[in-house]
Image: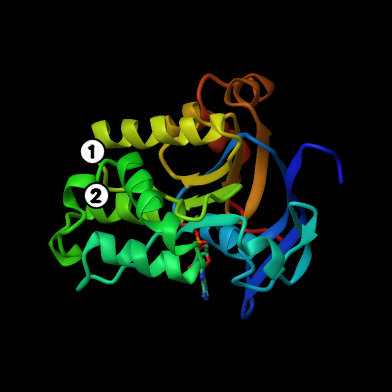
Amino acid sequence: MEENCCIKIKNLSKSYKNQRILKDVSFDVKCGEIFGLLGPSGAGKTTLIRLIMGMEKSNGGEIILLNEKVPNKNVIESIGYTAQADALYTDLSAEENMKFYCRLYKIPKKERKDRIEECLSIVNLNNHKKKIVSNFSGGMKRRLSLAISLIHNPKVLILDEPTVGLDPLLRKQIWRELYRLKDNGVTIVITTHVMDEAAYCDRLALIRNGKCISVGKTQEIIKENECNTLEEVFLKLGDDSYED
Ligand code: ADP
């Protein structure tokens, strides 16, 4: 595998029963970049992420993550993951949720307090740490989930729609923090169906109807396809015939 390659996806396919969800998907994510999976709802982004995480088995193709073939328990500890649905204990406080995940990731006891403070401050929740999570707004739960995915200092961060339901200010704040993590060498893979967010990513894979229809920098993708916007690229490349 080339140096500087963090995740290699090669000819990946996935079916549920007789339905083909992912069709021969290939792309590379480079170390230290923010890589966006952009596509409409139902395109297959979450399925792709679940395969990268080793939570689902593919029907063909290969995933190499940090030089190890997925699934592999050696690399799982290097990944921070936030699913679309928040995996939070709603009858516990934010801090208690963080403590739970500290134990899960076997973070040394003496480091826990500082790690929790640091991660909560990234998402601006320090002042709410004693609050019971069932009293949190949707946006606060999203931010807490992001803080939890950072608790073990992962090398790779995989985020499924982390900014969904957040107001524009918070969305900006989260992106600022993602940039800060990138500056510290973290590789970030993020799914979004919001075209605007593509501009924040270093590179993108456009996913439509289970296929990767284009990969590259936003401006390159737009130029190569002789379009003016990513929406136009989707319309141009995304034929809706369900030929497989
Ligand atoms: P996205 O994240 O882009 O919205 P998903 O990966 O969630 O897309 O879904 C892609 C397609 O796969 C959808 O048609 C969805 O209904 C289907 N799908 C996802 N998970 C399952 C499953 N466990 N069983 C059957 N179909 C599924």
Mark 1 neighbour class, 10 Å CA radius: few under 14, some 14 to 19, many 20 or more: few
Q: Which residue is mark 2?
A: 139
Dot placed on the residue nearer the N-terminal end, 1 or 2: 2
Would residue 103 be found to the left or right of residue 18 on screen? left
Q: Amino acid at mark 1?
A: Asp
Q: Quadrant of the C terminus?
A: bottom right
- Judge whether 223 appears above or below 55 on screen: above
| Image spot of residue 121 (x, y percent) | 31, 41
Mark 2 neighbour class, 10 Å CA radius: few under 14, some 14 to 19, many 20 or more: some
What residue lies at 69% left-to-right and 22% top-to-bottom?
A: 224
| Image spot of residue 86 (x, y percent) | 34, 63
- Colour pattern of the rendering: rainbow
Q: Are marks 1 and 2 in contact (CB under 8 Å)?
A: yes
Q: Amino acid at mark 2?
A: Gly
Which element type, helix, strand or loop, lies under badge 1?
loop
* Disc 2 residue lies near ligand 1 with CB under 8 A: no
Would residue 235 be found to the left or right of residue 144 on screen? right
- Judge whether 195 appears above or below 224 on screen: below
What residue lies at 64% left-to-right and 78% top-to-bottom?
A: 18
- Judge whether 58 appears above or below 82 on screen: below
Marker count (numbered): 2
Would residue 206 be found to the left or right of residue 102 on screen? right
Disc 1 and disc 2: Cα gap in Å? 8 Å
Which element type, helix, strand or loop, lies under badge 2?
helix
Q: Which residue is mark 1?
A: 167
